[in-house]
Image (spheres, rainbow, N blue to C red):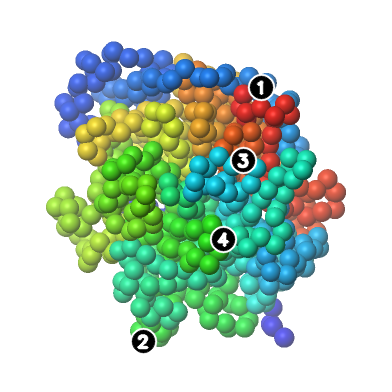
Amino acid sequence: MSDLRPFEIDNSGIDPQTNFSANPEFSEVLAANLQRRSFLKGTLGTAVATVFGGGLLGCNSSTTPAPVPLPEAVLPAPVQTFLNFKAIATSRLDTVVVPEGYSARPFLPMGTPLTGSYPAYRVDGTNSGADMEQQVGAHHDGMHFFPLDARGEGKNSNEGLLVFNHEYIDANVLHQNGPTGLPRPTDEVRKEVAAHGVTVAHIKKDAAGQFQLVQGSPLNRRITGATPMDIAGPARGHAKMVTKYSTDGTRTRGTLNNCGNGYTPWGTYLTAEENWAGYFMNSDVQQPREHKRYGVGTKNGRYYWETADSGADQYQRFNASTIATDADRDYRNEPNTFGWIVEIDPFNPDSVPQKRTALGRFGHEGVVFAPVAEGQPVVFYSGDDSTFEYIYKYVSKAPYFKATAGGHLLNEGTLYVARFNDDGSGEWLALDINSENFRAKALAANVEFSSQADVLINTRLAADVVGATKMDRPEWGAVHPQTGEVYFTLTNNTSRTDAQVNKANPRAKNATGHIIRWRERAAANSFDWDIFLLAGDVGTATGDLKLTADNHLASPDGLAFDKNGLLWIQTDMSGSQQNSGPYGNNQMLVADPKTKQIKRFLVGPVDCEVTGISFTPDMKTMFVNIQHPGDRSTPTQFTSNWPSDDKTQRPRSGTVIVTKNDGGVIGS
């Protein structure tokens, strides 16, 4: 019998701030940029109007001019009008609220039987670890709908694969009586590991036009925190990737803290490993920089998986302390195999997921591709979701050709990090050991990198070295389908002081967040940016746009453009913001960047995060994820019962299917 000792699990899923670099706030470099940017004042800057009709809000300075706003994009005339629905009010109801004329239906909640023996979900939380490996996982997050003909015409709106992430767990409701103590019972740990990862669900409309899971489909699949994976790209085989499990540094097990997502132009799914560092511990007197800069704990992992009472190797790997004489005999390097973007082929259930190391190692919130063009490199963007972290861009070395495109395009390229200058210009700084500028910056900072693989394993440190702009928690990104402008949410950062304010992060103690956007210049590695939206209460202004009761919001997080150019904004307010602020439960809004309209479209149940979004090709079905409803629950008292109406039921994360009652296009 285990000697169970009391302990407390961190259910926040949030890693601590680890960026304490001395990067300048970029008013210092403004003078050098003014001459280069002066053309904007006399030509483009005065010739066109801004999207919001005025300057950007920023820090007040008598010597620093306001950033030059982006010119209004020229968009094609719409074939139909949008945002005709009546905005909904904020809500604290334990249900999903959508506008009049729309319906929302829960779908595929945690525990739904998916594969194998199809074990039924047990409402008392007594499902085993083996059950969980065959069921839909917990804490639904990023998501994409692949029409069944995705690699053909891509027009099937009646059948496809819904692929979605499982970010973390709430042990209080996952288990019948919550976590039972230390050391952790092995089956509890097995269940928690299995609740992470990704679900691939084959879904199809029934005779009534309702999507249902295709039971028994060979395409249904669970990818968990224990699924074998390949390491691909520059870090494959590097000495810092060597473990007892993979003595040649080419493989690892599992993907964790899967938050945002992406999908490739060649029809594969990308899952982002976000706050993965907290799953590990390293009690060494001096942690290596690969652990310390990312926040690996010194005493225990977030869920104490390393204490599993069986002592099994698959759980011992969460102890990254130096135990043996050599790296191939312990798990000192196991954390280095996490923090990557993972590519999954949803149409091949036998495929091995690939961790694409050329894309950098950090707390990836998601990944968003720029529109591809034949013969041009693939470009995508990703944010590092932690306070004072950075925004990145990847450009493939090889060009894109539709006939031959594949994951190889993600194995070799250049990773850049963004610097947002106070005058509204921006620069992409290459994290490339072959760059003379990068080597000079590293030398000046007294930081040594042995190879490009070493740079990528230590992406955050490399970004520190080149002087990237520290942002207010960069999260999801979205690219406008017509203009190519890139939008990114900056969720919040209450740690920013008055002295740390800059134009791109214009508020100290930023509790409500904002959305930034930029347009790439024709000139290499440069862009122009402005602030699209400052979140906050009624009356908060961004230029001439003032928030009202129809659209006030806090902590923007999830972000996506639909094919009609509407921007969908999801919020991730903390429990205190939801319960004591003016915003109610977390919500989803929709904005038309051209008309300046923003309306609240959906409000989630109690204590949830609204996250993840996708559409069928005909734009008549929307999928939205509801994560951790009732996350203040105890094993005996639930603060939410969603998706059930039964007040005795424990809450479960799940997907919501939203349709328009008249069968029309979502958002119209």
Mark 4 crowd level (few <14, some 14–19, many ≥20, 10 Å Cα): many
Q: Is residue 26 left or right of residue 638?
A: left
User: Residue type at mark 4?
Assistant: Gly
* Pointers 2 and 3 in contact (C-beta within 8 Å): no
Give the quarter of the image for residue 293: bottom left
Which residue position holds label 1?
85
Residue 30, relative to residue 125: is it above or below?
A: above
Say which label, 4 or 3, has the lower sequence index.
3
Return the disc, 2 or 1, that comes first in the chain's sequence: 1
Badge 3 crowding class, 10 Å Cα cut-off, few under 14, some 14 to 19, many 20 or more, is many
Judging by the rendered image, the residue that carries numbered circle 4 is 197
Which residue is located at x 47 percent, y 64 percent? 353
Is disc 1 surrounded by few (<14), some (14 to 19) or many (20+) residues within 10 Å?
A: some
Q: CA distance from mark 1 to mark 3?
A: 23 Å
Sequence-earlier tag: 1 or 3: 1
Distance from label 1 to label 4 (Cα)? 36 Å
Q: Residue at x 42, y 28 (%)?
A: 482
Closer to viewer: mark 2 or mark 1 = 1
When the figure is inspected, residue 92 is found, relative to residue 113, above or below; the finding is above
- SS label for mark 2: loop
Quadrant that contains the N terminus: bottom right
Residue type beneath disc 1? Phe
Residue denoted by label 2: 325
Report the Cα–Cα distance between label 4 and label 3: 26 Å
Tell whether label 3 touches label 4 (CB within 8 Å).
no
Query: Looking at the image, do the residues carrying marks 4 and 2 touch, with CB atoms under 8 Å apart?
Result: no
In the image, residue 475 above or below residue 52: below
Name which residue type carries label 3. Answer: Ser
Q: Is residue 668 visible?
A: yes
Residue under label 3, please give it: 157
